[in-house]
Image: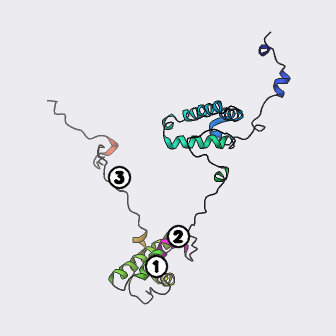
């Protein structure tokens, strides 16, 4: 009997089972273990010409997973880089692109410098502080006075969004004086900010009032009680 058709012992089969936990970790799991085995076999090929042919075949298999990007030059460069990464940089073949190194792969990006601002009154936000700094640089006049009032009203609105109770204008003026470094002083001003009801009033959606194109208007017939459609005369009837 042929060797491969011999009946195997069940105990030997169970003993030789492979579990994923016992296998080698995949460097790029998206391609699967079979492609990883192809790359490992290509790495062990001694003949240079055969090894290069095997590498090109593996690139075709990798590109078949994304056929719409297979012939794009940038995508080809990415496939070759992934091929060397999956071979743990042990594959010695001729690449049409620069071969990446292990050091470049392990480089970490620079930490982004996020603005670390810790304002005293966080409910105003950082944008209010930026607006106050801009107002400090403006020359005295009507434009600056108008900007200061806009800032003060926005501060009051932000204050009410976090604190639902009413707030006096003097409190907003004190905070504005403090955040501006004493350059904007409205403590003795007779100006009044908008009312709390005006600031917290929500705008009604216009989508219920204006029908979209292609959709019939829904008319509310108050005289039609009971939900029945009003009678419409048919011109075809005599």
- Say whether marks 1 and 3 touch (CB < 8 Å): no
Residue 197 image offset from top left, x and y in percent: 41, 71
Q: CA distance from mark 1 to mark 3?
A: 41 Å
Tell me the element at label 2: helix
Q: Which residues are magenta?
A: 110-129
Q: In the image, what residue occupies the spot 43% across and 68% down?
A: 200
Residue holding disc 3: 208
Residue 177 image offset from top left, x and y in percent: 48, 84
Q: Farthest residue toward the left?
A: 238
Q: Quadrant of the N terminus?
A: top right
Residue holding disc 1: 133
Figure check: 128 above or below 30:
below
First of labels 1, 2 by sequence position: 1
Left or right: 134, with 56 as reference point:
left
Q: Which mark is residue 162?
A: 2
The mark lying in front, picked from 2 and 3, is 2
């Amino acid at each position: 009997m042929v060797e491969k058709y011999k009946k195997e012992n069940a105990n030997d089969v169970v003993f030789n089972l492979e579990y994923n936990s016992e296998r080698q970790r995949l460097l790029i799991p998206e391609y699967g273990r079979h492609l990883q085995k192809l790359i490992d076999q290509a790495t062990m090929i001694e003949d240079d010409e055969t090894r290069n042919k095997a590498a090109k075949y593996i690139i075709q298999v990798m590109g078949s997973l994304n056929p719409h990007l297979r012939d794009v030059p940038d995508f080809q460069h990415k496939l070759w880089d992934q091929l060397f990464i999956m071979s743990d940089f042990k594959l010695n073949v001729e690449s049409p692109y620069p071969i990446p190194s292990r050091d470049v792969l392990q480089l970490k990006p620079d930490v982004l410098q996020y603005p670390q601002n810790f304002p005293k009154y966080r409910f105003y936000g950082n944008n209010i502080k930026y607006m106050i700094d801009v107002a400090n640089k403006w020359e005295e006049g009507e434009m600056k006075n108008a900007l200061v009032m806009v800032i003060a009203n926005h501060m009051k609105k932000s204050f009410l969004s976090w604190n639902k109770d009413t707030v006096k204008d003097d409190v907003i003026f004190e905070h504005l004086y403090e955040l501006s470094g004493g350059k904007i002083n409205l403590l003795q001003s007779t100006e009044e900010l908008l009312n709390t009801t005006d600031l917290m009033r929500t705008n009604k959606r216009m989508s219920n009032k204006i029908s979209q194109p292609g959709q019939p208007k829904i008319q509310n017939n108050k005289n039609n009680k009971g939900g029945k459609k009003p009678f419409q005369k048919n011109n075809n009837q005599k």
